Image: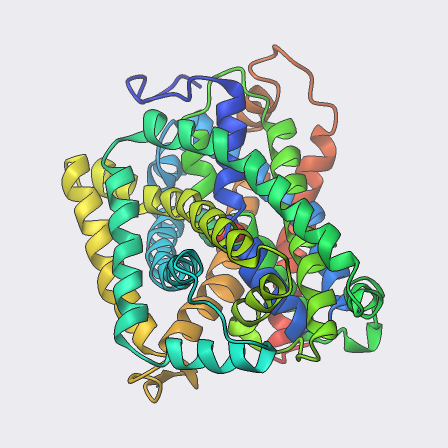
Amino acid sequence: MTSKNTHRAVFATRIGAIATTVGSAVGLGNIWRFPYEAGTHGGGAFMVCYIAFIFLLGVPVICAEFILGRSSRSNITGAFRLHASHRVWQLTGYMGVLSSLMILSFYSVVAGWTVEYMVQSAIGSLDYGDAAGYHTHFDSFVTGNWRPALWTIVFLAINFAILMRGVAKGIERFSNILMPMLFILLLIFCANSLTMAGAREGLSFLFSPDFSALTPSTMLGALGQAFFSLSLGLGTMLTYSSYFADNTRLGRSALITASLDTVVAILAGVIIFPAVFTFGMSPSAGPTLVFEVLPSIFHSLAGGTVWSTLFFFLLFLASLTSTISMSEIAITFFMEELKMKRRSAVVLNTGIAALFGTLCALSFGCLSDFTLFGLTLFNFFDTATSNVMLPLGGMIISVFVGWKLDRSVLSEQMTCRGATRFRPMRLLVFLLRWVCPVAIGLIFAQSIGIL
Ligand code: TRP
C-alpha cells in the first residue's frame, strides 16, 4: 500500500515516535484516574483485570490502530475510507472525534486542578494541616465555581499555544525531555510511601486480590481504565502512527508504550495507597482522591512545598502531552475532512473544549444538580467515554483489522515492509479476531445485565 499523503510530517527520530506515544498514554489517566478507579473498585481484583486487559486487549488494539494509521497516513475517518468498502465504518471516526472532544473537556478540568495546586504550592499557601484539612480545602475549591473554570480555560490556552506550533517541532521536543523526569520523581515518592506506617496495608489493598470483589462493574471499570490510559479506541494512536517513519517497528512500540504506561500507573498506586491508609482516609473517595492524598503526603515531607510544586508541575506537563494528542484527533479531522486551515481547526477544537470544559468545571459547583443518566456532566463525560465509547471504538477497530483488512497490509506494516520479522502474527490476528471483540462484548453485556 502506498502512502496517500506523502507531504504529511513524519517524526524525525524513532525514539521521538515512542516518546510521543508514551507521552500521550502517560498522563492524568495514570496518576489521577487509575488510583481513584482502583480505589472505588476494591484494589487488587481491579488491578488483576486491569493488567490482563492492557496486555490481552490493549496491546493488540494499539497494533491495530498503528496498522491503520501508518498504512493510510491519514486520520481515523480517512483510514476507514481508504480501507473499507462501506461507509458505515467511517462512523467510528465520527465517534472518535466526538469522544476526543468530550475527553478533552473534562480532562482539562482536572488538568486545571493541577495548575491551581502547582501555583498554590509555589506560593506556599497549600498548607491545611492534616488530611481532613486538605479534604475540606479541595472541596471548597472545586465547588467554588470561578477558580476551577478559570484554570480550565488557562490550561486550554496553553494547550492551544503549543498546538499552533505544529506536530514534530512542538510535541516531539517536549516529550523527549519530560518523560524521564516524570519517572524519576515518581520513583522518589514511591520510596517515600514505602516507609509509611500504612505501607503494608496499602500494598496489600493494591496487590492482594479479593476475588469476591470481582463484579461486572469492576471489570467494566478496568476495561475502561485500560483503554483510557492507553489513549485507545478513538484514533489517537492511529493518528500518531500516521506520523511514524516507515521503519518504526509497530509491535515493539506497542509493547513498550503499554509497559511503560502500566509501570507509571502502578507507581502512582504505590505512592497513593500507603498514604491513604497511613492518614486514615477512604480509598473509595472517587475523582477527588488524589488531590486530597497527595498534598497530605507532601505536607509530611521535609521541603514539602518544593516537592509539591515540582510534582504538580510535572503532572501538569504530563497532562499537556496527553491533551495535545487528543486534540490532534479533532484537528486532523477538521483539516483533512472539513478542509479547514490548521489555525481554524485548532481554534475550533479549543473553543468547543473551552465551552464544555467550563460546564464540566461548574458541574462540581453551581451545575451539580444538572445530571444526565443520574451523573453530573463531568462524571457523564468521564464514564460515557471511558466505559462505553472507547471500548466500543476498540472493538470496531479490532474487528475491522482482524476480519476486513487485507492480510497483506497487516504483515506489511508489522514487518516494516519485510525489513524486519514479526513472529507473533498469528497470535495478533487471533487476538484481534476473537479475543478483543468477544471479551469487550461480554463485559458490556454483563454490565448492562444481559448475562
Ligand atoms: N491516556 C491519557 C492519560 O492516561 C489520556 C488520553 C490521551 C486519552 N489521549 C487519549 C484517553 C485518547 C483516551 C483517548 O492520561
The structure residue drawn at horizontal position 36% and vertical position 25%, both measured from the top left corner, is: 168
Q: From the top left corner, tell me how far across and down residue 127 is, in percent.
A: 49, 70
Q: How is the image coloured?
A: rainbow
Q: From the top left corner, tell me how far across and down residue 83 is, in percent.
A: 42, 33
Looking at the rendering, which quadrant does residue 153 occupy? bottom left
Q: Which residue ends up furthest to the bottom in the rendered image?
A: 369
Image: 281 above or below 320: below
> Which of 375/115 is in front?
115
Position of 263 compared to 232: left or right? right
Position of 105 compared to 192: left or right? left
Image: 405 above or below 442: above
Looking at the rendering, which quadrant does residue 207 occupy? bottom right
- Is residue 434 shown to the viewer in this render? no
> Which of 353/133 is in front?
133
- Is residue 416 shown to the viewer in this render? yes
The structure residue drawn at horizontal position 78% and vertical position 57%, both measured from the top left corner, is: 194
Q: From the top left corner, tell me how far across and down residue 392 is, in percent.
A: 51, 58
Image: 122 above or below 62: below
Position of 138 compared to 215: left or right? left
Looking at the rendering, which quadrant does residue 391 occupy? bottom right
Tally the marks: 0
The structure residue drawn at horizontal position 28% and vertical position 18%, both measured from the top left corner, is: 7
> Which of 412/238 is in front?
238
In which quadrant is the N terminus drawn?
top left
In which quadrant is the C terminus drawn?
bottom right
Position of 86 compared to 412: left or right? left
The structure residue drawn at horizontal position 54% and vertical position 46%, both measured from the top left corner, is: 26
